Amino acid sequence: MIDKDIAPQQSSGIGHSRFSDITKSIDALYDAIRVDKLRLIEVSSPLDLMQIRAEKAEASLKASDIALEALQILQRNSLEIIKSSEIALASMKATIKENDEDALLKQRALDELTKVIEKNTVNLRASSLALSAVNELAFNDALTNLPNRRLLSDRLKQIIVSNKRWESYSAAIFMDLDNFKHLNDKFGHEAGDELLIAVGHRLKQAVRETDTVARYGGDEFVILLNRLNGNLVDAKAQAEVIADKVLAALNLPYALHIHTDEDAVQTIDYEIFASLGVAMFDGDTREENNILDWADEAMYWAKSEGGKTVRFYDAKNSVAQTLTVLYELATQNDIETANHGIRTRQYVKALANRAKQMNLFPNEITDQIIDRLFKTTQLHDIGKTKIPYAIIHKKERLTPEEWVIMKRHTTFGAQILEKAKKQNTSLTDFLNTAIDVAEAHHEHWDGSGYPKGLVGFDIPLAGRIMAIADVYDALISKRSYKAPWKHEDALAELTSKSGSQFDPLLIEALKQEQDNFRLIAESAKD
């Protein structure tokens, strides 16, 4: 992707205006710019915000751990002091006699010791209350007051043990709100938070008292269905009934309070739906993380089918479903045409084949790797799904602040694909290539690229190949902010940046393959 050019400004006849009118126009323009900047801050990526909040939550958990330990030490100390003081008090009382010369002195010591006991008793009560409060923060989500990941993990372990003992089945339901990002983009995070609180309340109302509803992070929730029927068929049917009930409860409109441009509060009815993934498990499941990964993957299957539905995890369809979900996710929020994907994958395949023929990278390019490169080009901009819609679809040149946000799509893409890799070990090699393509296709040979500023051969080969294909296609394609370049001009531009932006060896391969690039561009025009 190349920088968007600034469109030339049309003359407005401002030279014929009075000076005072010009001043007012400039002031109005500055005011508009200030408003836009403030709005830009509010339009930060909701998923980015979720990541920040997750980091804050993790920091809070660590702080609560420290606080818990300190309060526990305080309690132990108070108990020891009280215990020792009571022993000393009893001993001193036994030694006091009315006629003792030091009876008065001993009595004063007893009084002081009693005060110590009373003070530490007060401290003990205070630390118990504080311990309870900190314990609440450590195991509950601050926004929804639902159990957080830590308490969820503990409950899941207990349920697995219970299943083992009673030979029963349970289910984990992983839930994600469909298009929650658009709510935050349009109405702000306060409305989003209000919705999350309401969702948490509805979830608790829809399940049984013995079940656990937890906030997993962002707009993701997990429900643990405990002690279902003893055989898998009946347990699955029981879980499906509850999941359908949850889905129905969430589909009803929400009354949200939003702030208008006039800074007034308006109540709106807002509809949002959810995708649910269900994973069944018994007492023989050893890794609780696997259960949540299965449910999470099933949830993505539900999303790939349009959302607003429930899907159960099926290991047999895992690989195919994962690829389908990733490809569909990569097309969300993107301004590129379908032909862009067709062209870039053909450019990548042609360039990689030429590099192999020229023996430029011995042992680094095989037919299998070329096939992976061909299939992963569609995922190169998957991280843009986390970039605000207003920035992705802006027709003018991006501001420096917007570019900072836009450039994060490479890191976001790697994170999305890393998560998919953890859930699908059979796709490790494929997704490793996809990660290299997504994260490194904006790195520059001379180290001036992003996100890591890698230099030369430190940049993954997949990223270096994708960089050439992506920029060539951006140049020869028509955009709202520019006309399409001719093939010769695009080739000259890439060649001029050999050794600065692009791998010199791959540019040599491009020169050999330029006729094929032209044919690909012409055969798959927008």
Image: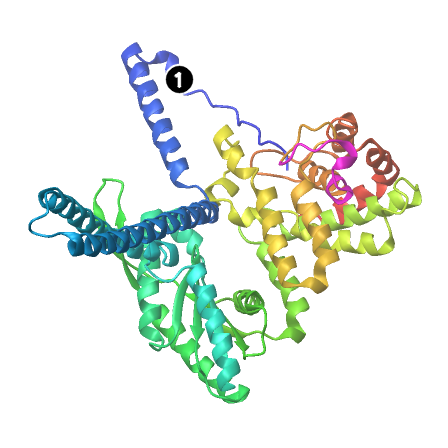
Residue 461 lies in magenta, yes or no? yes
Front in this rendered view, residue 137 or 334 = 137
Front in this rendered view, residue 438 or 121 = 121
Please give the name of the residue rendered at 32% of the width and 25% of the height, measured from the top-left corner: 31
Q: Can residue 251 be seen in this view?
A: no
Which residue is at the far right?
358
| Image label count | 1
Colouring used for the render: rainbow
Find disc 1 in the rendering and name its residue.
13
Front in this rendered view, residue 335 or 498 = 498
Q: Is residue 446 left or right of residue 53?
A: right
**Rendered location of residue 517, percent (x, y):** 80, 42
Q: In this view, does 39 lie to the left or right of 439?
A: left
Front in this rendered view, residue 88 or 63 = 88
Q: In this view, does 205 lie to the left or right of 307?
A: left
Identify the magenta region: 451-464
